[in-house]
Image (tube, rainbow, N blue to C red):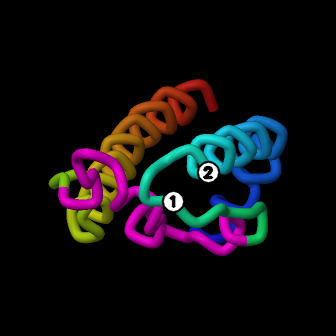
Amino acid sequence: LCQQISKGLQRRSEAIQKAITWYNFQARRLDPLRPPISWKDIAQYSFLGEFNLLQHVQDDIRECMWAKPAVHEATTKFFKLCHTKEEIMRLNVEMCHL
């Protein structure tokens, strides 16, 4: 999972840099001030719950059901299971061609 996050961050680094710049600009304008973030901070996050800056929004999305680690893991396993069924069907078709 950490490798996937790292690769995702690398692929989207320019967009993330722009978002960091925009966040820091807006954070300076808020009352009370919000702490700035850096690329280093973002690169160390591995799950939504570690994004502490999300607690400052009007609705703390970390409290949403889909943000809970157990639900996230169950959803990931569900979709892997769905793809496994698709893969079995594809392999059955390929076996007929052999």
Q: Which residue in the protein does label 1 denote?
A: 33
Mark 2–mark 1 distance (CA, rounded to whole Å) = 6 Å
Residue drawn at (75%, 55%), measured in percent from left and top? Answer: 7
Residue drawn at (58%, 66%), measured in percent from left and top? Answer: 35
**Image: 52 above or below 75:** below
Give residue 3's position: percent from left, percent from top.
Answer: 69, 67
Q: Nearer the viewer, residue 83 or 98?
A: 83
The reply to whether callout 2 and callout 1 are in contact (CB within 8 Å) is yes
Residue drawn at (57%, 50%), measured in percent from left and top? Answer: 27
Our reading of the magenta stretch's main secondary structure is helix
Q: Which residue in the protein does label 2 denote?
A: 28
**Image: 72 above or below 78:** below
Secondary structure of the residue carrying tag 1 is loop
Q: Quadrant of the N terminus?
A: bottom right
Give residue 17's position: percent from left, percent from top.
Answer: 79, 45
Q: Quadrant of the C terminus?
A: top right
Secondary structure of the residue carrying tag 2 is helix
**Which amino acid type is shown beneath numbered disc 2?**
Arg
Question: Residue 36, located in which quarter of the rendered image?
Answer: bottom right
**Which amino acid type is shown beneath numbered disc 1?**
Leu
Q: Nearer the viewer, residue 80 or 12?
A: 12
**Start and end of the magenta stretch?**
41-63
Give residue 76's position: percent from left, percent from top.
Answer: 35, 55
